Amino acid sequence: MLGQLIVSGLAVGFCYALLALGMVIIYKTSEVLNFAQGEMAMISSFVAFTLLESYHLSFPLALLLTFLFAAGLGAFLEFTFLRPAKDPTVIGMIIITLGFEMILMGLAGWKWGPDQRSMPFPISGFETYNFFGLLISKVNFWTIIICLILMALLFFFFQYSKLGTAMRATQQNRLVARLMGIRTKRIFSFTWALSSFIGSVAGMFIATLTVLDPPMMMDPLMKAFAAAVLGGMTSLPGAALGGAILGVVENLFGGYVSLSFKSVVAFTIIVLMLCIRPSGLLGKHFVKKV
């Protein structure tokens, strides 16, 4: 039982980690906390569902179109709602993302209704792999593998690609990056597109592991935020580590203590981490000297 709880906790935790990575990427580049991340993932999941169920597209084609939609949605939000904001405050930017979250929630409710659906996923949630006596469902196994691959690709992208270097330069000093010829506005749009794409992957996995409905991402988003706070809002490895830790801890808590208080774990972690180490496990706290 312990092994199965850990594995299923890792599967959910890596979904939290992907959402947290999306939030951290945006925060590192533009210092905006995107609380619409969950609803962007939810809308993308519904798009995938519609392409598969209503238009009967093959899964790879539906996946490709969904990823393109998700990237376009992220770029649209940055270009339409955030870029025109004049001298925005932190609170103002948060309110903009919260407003976009409500818009997407209302749109999903109007278009698809409140009914719960099952995501048509090609990997069975009932079939299992047997690893030395440990039974792991195929959907949990491939969720972990695919999430790990995607996180590894993200880390290599930021460390070794020119575009990743430009994004890191924009995060460190926007003015100097612009003087060096980096088109920071395009970097911001790409950042939001990339974040939305990452979130869409997490959204489809969460819809497969649970159910697909308009409020499906409200709880995972708060847990992703907790994971980002735990690992560090400025650290990509920290967000990944925070998601894995949170998924395992809450699953063990639900399995051995009580399912009723399973969701309380995330908020307890936020409070404790902010009190003990505000920068997170792997985050760095910078002090500006004036």
Image (cartoon, rainbow, N blue to C red):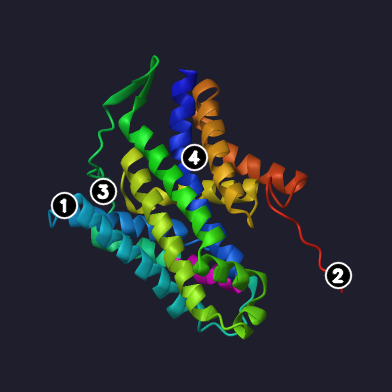
| Label 4 vs label 2, nearer the camera | 2
Q: Residues within 10 Å of mark 4 (few under 14, many from 20)?
A: many
Mark 1–mark 4 distance (CA, rounded to whole Å): 28 Å
Q: Is residue 116 magenta?
A: no
The amino acid type of the residue labelled 1 equals Ser
| First in residue order: circle 1 vs circle 4 | 4
Q: Residues within 10 Å of mark 1 (few under 14, many from 20)?
A: few
Mark 4–mark 2 distance (CA, rounded to whole Å): 38 Å
Please name the residue shown 52% across and 49% down the image. 224
The amino acid type of the residue labelled 3 equals Asp
Q: Which residue is denoted by mark 1 in the rendering?
A: 58
Find residue 289 and name its label: 2
Q: Secondary structure at mark 2?
A: loop
Find residue 13 and name its label: 4
| Label 3 vs label 1, nearer the camera | 1
Q: Is residue 159 above or below residue 126?
A: below
| First in residue order: circle 4 vs circle 2 | 4
Please name the residue shown 32% across and 60% down the image. 67
| First in residue order: circle 3 vs circle 1 | 1
